[in-house]
């Protein structure tokens, strides 16, 4: 995230609200808590009750959000599974970790949140529910002592077995924790769980239809998407209940977020990845640590890049220098407000084909579609191939229906800086080899909608 500020942003920072309702510290809280990060694939913040949704999709997520700090304005650096998760885990922007598209691996040997915690005595494990996050496609496995990818399910007709259900992932995570607890002596752990629901194709979960108010005679895609949220919400409750049997509440820090949102027809687009509009760029984000993190809401801009510095800072581990994200720990401790920043965001083509004759597969820079900045309530995005600029006032026009940019608009200084940084980073990656995907992987990425 760019630290560059302009006068408009400075004004906004004074009106950004940060509301606290509970004491900031507790004598009983562990300085070395176990940390659980839950990511829910393609989960829109505005389809959760805690973000104002009218349907009862998420009672358990809402309760969790009410127990800690909920970020009202959080975005993902890139609205695509592999790139976003690699950014969350390493704290780096996509053009720096190199996994800019699904099927492109990160650079080997990068530092990361789980590696840093492991060096400081935490046990680390991850359990993922989607083929897209397989270690051989991302290199995420090198960052965890245990990397669980039991992907033998299909959720829909025509899709090969390439996923794990939310029940599977929950079972695997709790089984791992049970085995760890048998080994003793107890060490704190870092556990990351990634659920694939409600990623497309949206399966209908009949058992939640009545509660949500869905009529199964006239199901829409949005209805099915909402029942998927209800299903994953129930699994999250079971996961947290199981973990809390093994760990005292004050020794447990929980993060709930998403890799990206999901466009449900807005701008004539279904899915995520190719655009920087709010439905797929905005994410839910909550951090809960009873007795330490206050209950409240933050309305200043936050991103997934903030997670690594924030969590390390909160648990008392030195934060590596030069990370693009910011630590919220100082704000959480009540010792100063984080400045509103200009966030830099990017969108790329969905996945590589594995066909090395395609120019867009050979060079990472050829996959770049859009770059954008968010600056207070102003979002400015540019379609890179045509230098076409759109500007939206997110407060007055949350649906991004009317661009405020004149036809011949030139990029602002902050957008130019973001664009230059992304282009420079991608250019430096173009000598990095892209791997040829095996036929099975190509088929699975195509089934998930990532191949054109
Ligand atoms: Zn995803």
Image (tube, helix red, strand yellow):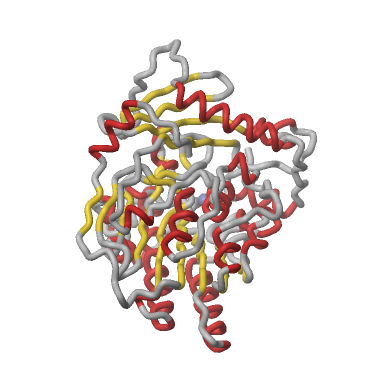
The vertical placement of 84 against 34, above or below, is: above
The vertical placement of 235 against 89, above or below, is: below
The vertical placement of 311 against 2, above or below, is: below
Quarter of the image for the C terminus: give it: top right
**9 horizontally vs 272: left or right:** left
Residue 307 % position (x, y): 46, 54
Q: Residue at x 54, y 58 (%)?
A: 156
**55 horizontally vs 84: left or right:** left
Residue 408 % position (x, y): 45, 10
Q: Residue at x 41, y 72 (%)?
A: 31
Q: How many marks?
A: 0
Q: 185 or 152: nearer the eye?
A: 185
Residue 326 % position (x, y): 44, 48
Q: Residue furthest top?
A: 408
Residue 163 % position (x, y): 58, 61
The image quarter containing residue 252 is bottom left
Residue 210 seen by the camera: no
Q: Residue at x 55, y 87 (%)?
A: 184
Q: Residue furthest left?
A: 21
Q: Residue furthest right?
A: 357
Residue 257 seen by the camera: yes
Q: 346 or 159: nearer the eye?
A: 346
Q: 423 or 9: nearer the eye?
A: 9
Q: Residue at x 48, y 39 (%)?
A: 1
């Amino acid at each position: 995230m760019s630290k560059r500020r302009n006068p408009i942003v400075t004004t906004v920072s004074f009106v950004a609200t940060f509301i606290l309702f509970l004491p900031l510290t507790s004598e009983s809280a562990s300085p070395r808590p176990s940390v659980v990060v839950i990511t829910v694939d393609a989960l829109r913040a505005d389809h959760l009750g805690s973000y104002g949704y009218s349907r009862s999709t998420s009672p358990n997520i809402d309760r969790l959000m009410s127990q800690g700090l909920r970020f009202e304005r959080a975005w993902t650096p890139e609205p695509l599974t592999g790139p976003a998760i690699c950014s969350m885990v390493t704290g780096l922007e996509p053009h720096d970790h190199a996994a800019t598209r699904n099927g492109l691996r990160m650079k080997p040997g990068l530092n990361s949140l789980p590696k840093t915690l492991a060096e400081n005595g935490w046990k680390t494990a991850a359990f993922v529910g989607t083929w897209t996050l397989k270690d051989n496609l991302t290199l995420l496995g090198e960052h965890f002592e245990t990397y669980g990818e039991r992907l033998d399910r299909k959720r829909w007709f025509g899709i090969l077995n390439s996923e794990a259900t939310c029940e599977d992932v929950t079972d695997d995570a709790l089984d791992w924790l049970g085995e760890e607890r048998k080994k003793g002596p107890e060490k704190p752990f870092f556990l990351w769980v990634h659920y694939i629901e409600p990623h497309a194709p949206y399966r209908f979960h009949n058992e939640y239809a009545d509660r949500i108010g869905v009529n199964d005679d006239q199901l829409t895609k949005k209805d099915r998407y909402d029942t998927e949220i209800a299903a994953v919400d129930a699994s999250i409750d079971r996961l947290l209940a199981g973990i809390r049997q093994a760990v005292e509440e004050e020794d447990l820090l929980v993060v709930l977020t998403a890799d990206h949102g999901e466009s449900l027809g807005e701008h004539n687009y279904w899915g995520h990845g190719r655009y920087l509009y709010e439905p797929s760029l905005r994410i839910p984000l909550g951090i809960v640590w009873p007795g330490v993190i206050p209950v409240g809401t933050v309305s200043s801009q936050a991103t997934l890049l903030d997670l690594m510095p924030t969590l390390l800072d909160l648990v008392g581990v030195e934060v590596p220098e030069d990370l693009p994200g910011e630590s919220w720990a100082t704000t959480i401790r009540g010792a100063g407000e984080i400045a509103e920043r200009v966030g830099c965001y990017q969108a790329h083509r969905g996945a590589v084909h594995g066909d090395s004759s395609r120019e867009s597969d050979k060079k990472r820079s050829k996959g770049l579609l859009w770059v954008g900045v968010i600056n207070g309530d102003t979002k400015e995005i540019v379609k890179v191939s045509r230098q076409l600029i759109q500007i939206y006032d997110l407060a007055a026009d949350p649906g991004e229906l009317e661009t405020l940019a004149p036809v011949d608009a030139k990029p602002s200084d902050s957008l130019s800086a973001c664009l230059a940084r992304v282009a420079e980073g991608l250019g430096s990656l173009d000598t990095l080899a892209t791997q040829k995907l095996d036929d099975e992987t190509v088929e699975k990425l195509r089934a998930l909608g990532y191949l054109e």
